Amino acid sequence: MSIEIKIREIAPARIQTAVLAFPVTDKGLEGSPAKRLDRQLKGKLAALVKKSSFAAKRGSSLLLATHGAMPAGHVLLVGLGKQDEAGPHAWRTAGAVTAREAGRIWADDAVFMLPPDQQTGAVVEAVAEGALLSAYRFNKYRSKDPPPGRLRTLTVGRTAAGRNAALTRAVRRARVSVSAICLARDLVNEPASTATASYLAEQAASHCRGEGLKVEVWGKRKIQQMKLAGLLAVNQGSREEPRFLHIRYKPKTKPRRKVALIGKGITFDSGGLSLKPPRSMETMKLDMAGGAAVIAVMSALPELAPDVEVLGLVPATDNLPDGGAQKPGDVIRYLNGKTVEVMNTDAEGRLILADALVLAAREKPDCMINLATLTGACIVALGNELAGLFCNHGELAEELEACGRDAGEGLWRLPLAAEYREDIKSPVADIKNVGGGSAGAITAALFLQEFVDDVPWAHLDIAGPAFAAKDRVTCPKGGTGFGVRTLLNFLSGTGE
């Protein structure tokens, strides 16, 4: 996050910079300020567009060296995709592509020219977010620092005169948002031997500071006093004591609503006695991505100052097969009186989330949202780009879907199909923690629904998009921070 973002009124033909970037839709150069500059370039830009069959697809780019024909060293076309689909995520991607392409030619500075009809705070915020996110690297454990050469300064250029105060505020919001996303990424990327439950608690206490924020960390004794039986059961096989993070934000003014955020904090998941295959364990440090997202969101609230009271809950432990570990067939009695037969110790995330959902429901919030890397079944259904959305309240689902679209974090609504409730019935307890083998994402959501009472509630199964298997333009391989932008949009009351 070393890129400096500036806002300036600029005449493209006269600006001296290493890279002068123009966003372009599927309409090509028509209507773009880049078309006027092509006269100085003697038609070379249009010729290159034709020769390369550049279609301006989202994430695409085309670079042309000017060879002294104008003060800018290179002209860069950045694709936005179809003109009628160029929403916030298209601009976010364009900002990231500009930063990436400038870095590839070792440029220290670049200018991103806003079209005359897009010089708004929302566009500037998205462009800045993309550029800043593209700069993220987790290099803590590398023996050598990566070579220099990434972009240092990105100037967002506007052609119209006017005050920049609103655009400057947009850049500040982008920095706060990206700082939170990078915190979530750092927590996920940290090795599980370091990122224990107590480490998550320390990080929450360190980062969740500021006006209106209060962090309370419950150790094992307090967890026992509160009768959080699911968390205690999963923790039985661990040498690391559990933690339960209780983070509260209260705005200065009367809140317009009260929201509870719950994040799964399994710091490493071996599967317990229902042991995973070795390959399946390789990335299981990611299993606390939901908890990381909640910590990150809470850390940003003092600066963004939404008029919402927010309760953040993160139950945290690892899941290991020690001699004292819980066993298939064990029964857990929860704080709300419901009993659960544990049929598979690798379905542990829902066991600790149930504790948090019961506590959150007792606070009578206007809504509850939980995030969890919960099921491989959701990855089978939706792949690695989309999160599953389960919700018992139509308006809440629609609001989250809109916030996700603006954030570039796709949510696909799946049914809380009552027909599958029979699959989690137990012969010895009220319910069991796994279904019959099919519809696994749905039966997991139905299990969680048993603990929400009648509170409007949404469950985001982020098992796929929480971790990138390969480099992306806005994120290198590893933790993505998925969900942070969506929740910040939701708490700020933004979204389509």
Image (cartoon, helix red, strand yellow):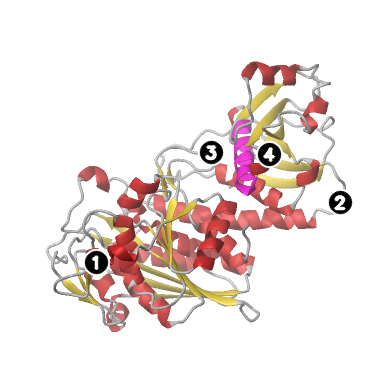
Q: Is residue 194 left or right of residue 107?
A: left
Q: Is residue 271 left or right of residue 336?
A: left
Mark 1 to mark 2 CA distance (whole Å): 63 Å
Q: Is residue 324 magenta?
A: no
Task: Please tell me which of labels 3 and 1 falls first in the chain.
Answer: 1
Q: Quadrant of residue 98?
A: top right
- At label 3, the amino acid type is Val
Q: Where are the magenta residues, as a range?
A: 87-103
User: Percent from the top left, x then y, of residue 252?
Assistant: 64, 79
Secondary structure type for disc 3 = loop
Mark 3 to mark 1 CA distance (whole Å): 44 Å
Task: Please tell me which of labels 2 and 4 falls first in the chain.
Answer: 4
> Residue tagged by mark 2?
162
Q: Is residue 332 left or right of residue 248?
A: left
Circle nearer the viewer, 3 or 1 = 1
Residue 422 got which mark? 1
Secondary structure type for disc 1 = helix
Pick the residue in front: 400 or 349.
Answer: 400
> Residue tagged by mark 4?
83
> Residue tagged by mark 3?
473
Circle nearer the viewer, 4 or 3 = 4
Residue at (80, 53) in percent of width and height: 164
User: Percent from the top left, x then y, of residue 398?
Assistant: 54, 61
